[in-house]
Image (cartoon, grey):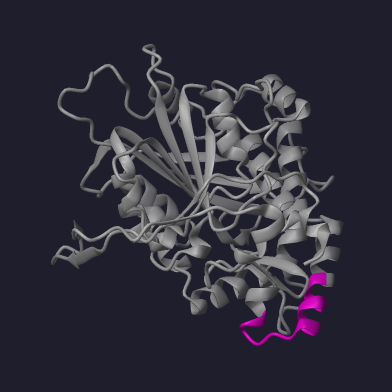
Amino acid sequence: MSNSHLSVPKYDQEPQNFSRSQAWSHSEDNDNKSHYTIRKAESRTSLCSYRSSRDLLDFIADIRGRMYSSMSDLYVLPSDQEEWERLNKFHNSLLLALGNLCPDMDIVDTILAPPSGASKSVLDLGCGTGRWCMEMGYRYPNADVVGVDLVPYPLNPDTTAQQCHFELDNVDLGLSHFFDQFDLVHARCIELGLSDYKKMVEEATFCLRPGGLLILAEIDWQLYEEDMKTPVIPASDEHPKGCWIQRFLEESRDAACKNGSDLLETRQVLQEGLWDKPNIDNTTCRSASLYLPISNPSEVQELPRRMESAASLMKQNLMVLHRSLHRILRTAEISQEQLDRWSSEADKELERGDKRLWIRVRYAWGRREASPEASPTEPSSTDTESSASSHPVARGEGSFLSAEIHQMLKAETELYPYFYIYQTQEEARAAFHSQGD
């Protein structure tokens, strides 16, 4: 491995957690409701320290000049500088759309910044570059923030919030070692590395303390036309003027499913939300669709500056993503020569930007049932009219939030117009059904 892959400042991390959870016994009753029982078993948790200059190859593999996790056969996106920059751009596009780090930020503030100043704990499953964790750490100085991921990210100690720490962990192996420890659990865009998304959600609910909040978010593997309902036609021999990015997304989704990733079940789980989870207070549950623009053609109605920036970031994100998907597509016996041709066409398509397309992020959230002795003063989830951006994210000392994004969030405080929150499971089902799900 060349030194170019180690160009970002790094520090030697604390012992990391490679955890296999305690064994689970799973069954379903006649109503198709899941029941989980923990079988007492000897812990199989192991600890491993690494030095970035010496042991990094223990966790990553060089495949055709790009770095990948060696801890999972499911997660086949790269883990290198180019991919980290892409992930940060995607994070910023969501930040611009939501106006904050989470939906329903009033509830998050209530949980993590109580008047008593009590210490709180946050878990980010699949933390990637750790950007979300570190921004949460700056916003909530009384909260300990734990980020877990398959691959070590080269963190800079000078910009890492002191109460943030990161662990190497394969979420697909189970979460029982995290049970009953966190006031907020966040899982965003981790479905590619999971063989059973529903099981992960079930376990994540048990990672919460009473009254804790679980937030899930996954991106659709397809683009939508201007109406945000009609899937874009992918390019093919039959449709040579179709969309090449759509071809990449659909082919990659199918290849990932054949490889064992639970992408199709994920859509159903997020559509159903958390209302039926036995330990979740269903009065606090919501689900949502967030639509992000891919481009901003001049002949289409002009977007506000904040949305225009989000569109630009998503375009840059996709410019990198389609090449990051080459590895999974090679498993579908698509030649590298053909993939290079597809990528060339996708680049031209994105550069033209002559048609506004949308990509959807599905959200679901809800709170674990409070203990009987808990104070009744904490509010439940807010209604449709409340905004994730009602309290724009603070740009504290050491924050990664750029001055430009911070100023846009302060200047444009109105509701993002393409974030649709569903108050009930029936409303969510109807909305997703109208969108062809």
Is residue 429 shown left or right of residue 416?
left
Q: Residue furthest top?
A: 115
Residue at image location 70% in from the left, 31% down from the top: 158
Q: Quadrant of residue 159?
A: top right
Based on the picture, tell me whether residue 336 belongs to the magenta stretch.
yes
Which one is in front, 217 or 425? 217
The residues colored magenta run 330-343
On screen, residue 117 above or below 98: above
Query: Along the horizontal axis of the image, is 76 left or right of 408?
Result: left
Residue 166 magenta: no
Q: Quadrant of the N terminus?
A: bottom right
Residue at 57%, 52% (x, y): give it. Answer: 360
- Percent x, y of residue 75: 56, 66
Location of residue 131 in the rendering, given as x and y in whole percent from the top left corner? 63, 40
The answer to whether 398 is drawn above or below residue 69 in the figure is: above
Judge left or right: residue 24 versus residue 352. Answer: left
* Residue at the image point whose x is 63% and y is 68% from the top: 249
**Near-viewer residue (422 or 140):** 140
Q: Quadrant of the C terminus?
A: bottom left
Residue placed at 77% from the left, 82% from the top? Answer: 336
Secondary structure that dominates the magenta span = helix
In the rendered image of this protein, does residue 307 appear above or below residue 173? above
